[in-house]
Image: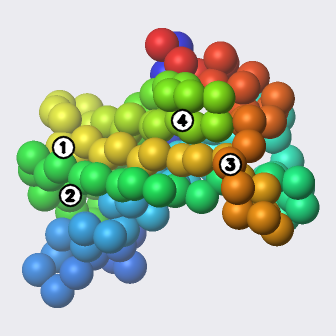
């Protein structure tokens, strides 16, 4: 089952043309990622300051099909998928009640913060992957 994040688009999300600025789509997708972690019982404060592991994004892409405007209500369907012992990706589908408007992907890798070497995903991420994977 995918995780669904509901959000209103605010004026601060838009550019001079009145549509969501492209970089903000990734920021909004990251909000959905953080909300899905919290919904799985992961402490965001502990997760993002953990001295034993870090999970940086190593790839991101976005495809736009329709503009998104201030005041639009969007739903982000987040579907994570484990790719390797130390790597996963998240597929995002941004929709309104009528249509698909954007697709995005982020790829993440788990590393040891001090050595910057790859390491296995922690158990809380494995549980999160199992909870929200399709």
* Among the two numbered marks 4 and 3 on one chain, the one whose residue lies closer to the N terminus: 4
Residue 94 figure quarter: top left
The reply to whether dot 4 and dot 2 touch (C-beta < 8 Å) is no
Residue at 74 percent across and 36 percent down: it is: 120
Residue hosting label 3: 118
Observer-nearest of 90 and 116:
116
Residue hosting label 2: 68
Q: CA distance from mark 4 to mark 2?
A: 28 Å
Other residues around mark 3 within 10 Å, as few (<14) / some (14–19) / many (≥20): some
Q: Is residue 91 left or right of residue 56?
A: left
The reply to whether dot 4 and dot 1 touch (C-beta < 8 Å) is no
Other residues around mark 4 within 10 Å, as few (<14) / some (14–19) / many (≥20): many
Residue at 25 percent across and 42 percent down: it is: 103
Q: Secondary structure at mark 3?
A: loop
Q: CA distance from mark 1 to mark 2?
A: 8 Å
* Among the two numbered marks 2 and 3 on one chain, the one whose residue lies closer to the N terminus: 2
* Among the two numbered marks 4 and 2 on one chain, the one whose residue lies closer to the N terminus: 2
Residue at 65 percent across and 17 percent down: it is: 130
Residue hosting label 4: 88
Q: Position of residue 52 (x, y in %)?
A: 88, 54
Observer-nearest of 21 and 53:
53
Q: Nearer the viewer, mark 2 or mark 3?
A: 3
Q: Is residue 105 left or right of residue 62?
A: right
Q: CA distance from mark 2 to mark 3?
A: 37 Å
Q: Position of residue 42 (x, y in %)?
A: 81, 40
The reply to whether dot 1 and dot 3 touch (C-beta < 8 Å) is no
Q: Secondary structure at mark 1?
A: strand
Q: Is residue 19 left or right of residue 75?
A: left
* Among the two numbered marks 1 and 2 on one chain, the one whose residue lies closer to the N terminus: 2
């Amino acid at each position: 089952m995918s995780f669904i994040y509901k959000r209103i688009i605010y004026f601060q999300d838009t550019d001079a043309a009145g549509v969501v600025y492209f970089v903000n789509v990734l920021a909004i997708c990251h909000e959905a990622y953080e909300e899905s972690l919290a919904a799985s019982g992961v402490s965001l404060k502990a997760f993002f300051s953990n001295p034993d592991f870090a999970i940086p994004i190593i790839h991101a892409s976005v495809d736009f099909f329709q503009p998104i405007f201030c005041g639009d209500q969007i739903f982000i369907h987040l579907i994570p998928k484990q790719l390797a012992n130390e790597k996963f990706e998240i597929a995002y589908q941004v929709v309104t009640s009528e249509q698909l408007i954007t697709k995005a992907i982020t790829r993440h890798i788990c590393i040891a913060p001090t050595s910057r070497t790859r390491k296995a995903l922690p158990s809380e991420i494995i549980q999160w992957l199992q909870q929200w994977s399709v």
